[in-house]
Amino acid sequence: MEMGFVKQNNLFDFLLDLQSQVIHVSKGEIAVPIYYMQKENLKIGDTLRIKNDKAQLEFTVVSFIRDVQMNPSIVSSKRFVVSDTDFENLKENFGVIEYQIGFQLHDPGKISEFTNSYRLSGLPQKGPTIDYKLLKTLNALTDGLIAAVIMFISFLLNIVALLCLRFTILATIEEDYKEIGVMKAIGILPHDIKILYILKYFVMAAGACVSGYIISLFLNKIFSANIMLYIGSAPKSIVQLIIPFLATALIFFIVLFFCMLTLRRFNRITAVEALRLGNTGESYTRNSFLPLYKNKLFNVNIFIGLRDVLLRFKLYTLLFFVFFICTFIIIVPINFLNTIESPEFVTYMGMGDSEILIDLRYTENIIERFENMVTYIEKDPDVEKFSTLIICKFNIINKDGYEESLIVGTGDSTVFPLEYLEGTAPVGDNEIALSYLIAGELEKSVGENIQLVVDDQIKMMQVSGIYQDITNGGKTAKAAIAPNHETALWYMVNLDVKTNTDEKIDEYAEAFYPAKVTDINGYLDQTFENTTSQLQLLTLLAVIIAVLVAMLITSLFLKMLIAKDSSQIVIMKSLGFSLKDIQLQYITRALVVLNTGIILGTVFSNTIGQSIISAILSIVGAPKIEFIINPYHAYILCPLGLIIIVTITTLLSIVSMKNFNMSDMNAE
């Protein structure tokens, strides 16, 4: 992170406090970015000290900054606000001067036109160009990404909720089967019976939706706390109440409609069957299938449990889908979190995977400093391999025939190669690799040509490859051409070393000051620390919710199944099966369905789940995310935890069968 010390702006781009008021500080006071408030756990009144060999200054933290331009952690610069007097003191004794030229347009739709006019004006060009669209994209990479994951999990939970509702209704029908038969026998029409049940679920659904809506008004602050901290709250309006209300109403009508669909099975119930059997009367369709006497592989009770799942496959389908979705909800966030925290994620940021990254920018005699740094590294026997990359601004001719600027990394991209969606790294001086978003914007694919402006001359460049990049708005390029030092934005060196990485970082940080020297893990931590911390919390919540749902559905399903199988349970007891034998049969049924759901859920998490995350990140330039999977989490800890929880839930849910006896059957 680069720390910039600024005075408050006069006209626009104001730096705001946590109450969204323009910040004003006095001599000896400082306002600190929210990023550092969270990272260092700062509080009002803390002391911030700046020192070098020449001077030392102390400031008292009096406020924290909301900065529309530099809030996101992926933006590597942060602005601190100081008084005019302190600014002049800092200017004389510390750091280097950096200028930022900003414009506010009457019509945001003319940003591209204005940018092109500025480029032709002859005004200062060095440095990155950031516009309103890019600022929105950068913010979307932090809280927007978390919001997308939350919506994805919420969608899956809605599906689980509907399945849960179906379980509840079926269990109720199973318990009330005789009563339904009696009502039909005395002449009550199926439609009227259905209305009785619909009214019950209407009242429960309405009460739950209203309660959920009211509670959400309070819980909303918890889930949106980080967004509110960085962006602030929007002005209160009726829309903020209407949209959640409409969403609640939609859920209510979906639930009611689903209830009506499930209750259609009343039409298939006959009074005679209900009174005679006391349950739905479902029986095995093929009793000759897998006869018990042919079993030579499994324990008798385990075999009966397996056979029951196969014979009544349709009955267990709902339970399977619940376990499948719960596994999906658990594994996708865990895999995504592992991916973001992995050093390999740097390849989605348009950089090769190296051990150390050296970043030099905005300093006096930068070319000379860079050349000295490269010479030092070349002579260092501890260096295994290295490559240099000079990030420059070049102009390209877009599809409309106008020039627009593009950030191009010049240098050898083969030493630490990227993973290309198509093609390969550029090698010749007439080849260029494009990021996914700029390739889409220019409508170019591998093998086609683009026009690059080099030394005021148009040079035809052939697209050698297309790669993923979520930095700089996702619009970058790589080329093996001579750099343009006049428009160079910054200088980078990637390297691997043979010795201890931490010791080498300390050595280079001192030797190459003011260059920034970091290891890849440190770079990713600083860039995505806020996002990963939120994703860790979200992943924990997803695991807890999925486990609770699995417990609830398992309990509901088994209670329904026991009610359905009550007569068979009594018969098995009379034939000499012990309670433990029967319990083992039901545990086998639950675990067979669970393990099938876990296996398919894991497979789909690493395929469809990976595709869904890729679709989300394609908006910012990474359309093909490959999960970095921790086998211990994905294949051992999560499945084993679910198996233990479902087994315990099964044991607790089948306790009631010990009360079944032959007298109950005779009474029926």
Image (tube, rainbow, N blue to C red):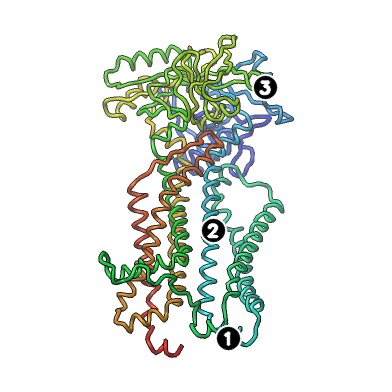
Question: In the picture, residue 260 is in which quadrant?
Answer: bottom right
Q: Nearer the viewer, mark 3 or mark 1?
A: 1
Write down the residue under mark 1. Answer: 182
x, y percent for residue 513: 40, 21
The residue shown at (59%, 17%) is 395
Q: Nearer the viewer, residue 633 or 109?
A: 633
Q: Earlier in the sequence, mark 3 or mark 1?
A: 1
- Going by the numbered disc 3, the residue's amino acid type is Asp
- Going by the numbered disc 1, the residue's amino acid type is Val
Q: Alpha-carbon distance for marks 2 and 3?
A: 46 Å
The residue shown at (37%, 49%) is 634
- Going by the numbered disc 2, the residue's amino acid type is Ile
Q: Nearer the viewer, residue 457 or 226?
A: 457
Q: Earlier in the sequence, mark 1 or mark 2?
A: 2
The residue shown at (44%, 35%) is 526
x, y percent for residue 178: 53, 83
Number of the label disc, if any, that sits on residue 637: none
Number of the label disc, if any, that sits on residue 400: 3
Write down the residue under mark 2. Answer: 159
Question: In the picture, residue 511 is in which quadrant?
Answer: top left
Please tell me how crowded label 3 is: few (under 14), some (14-19), or many (20+) other residues with Cα within 10 Å.
few
Is residue 96 visible in the rendered image? The answer is: no
Query: Is mark 1 in CB contact (under 8 Å) with mark 2?
Result: no
Say left or right for 480 vs 296. Answer: right
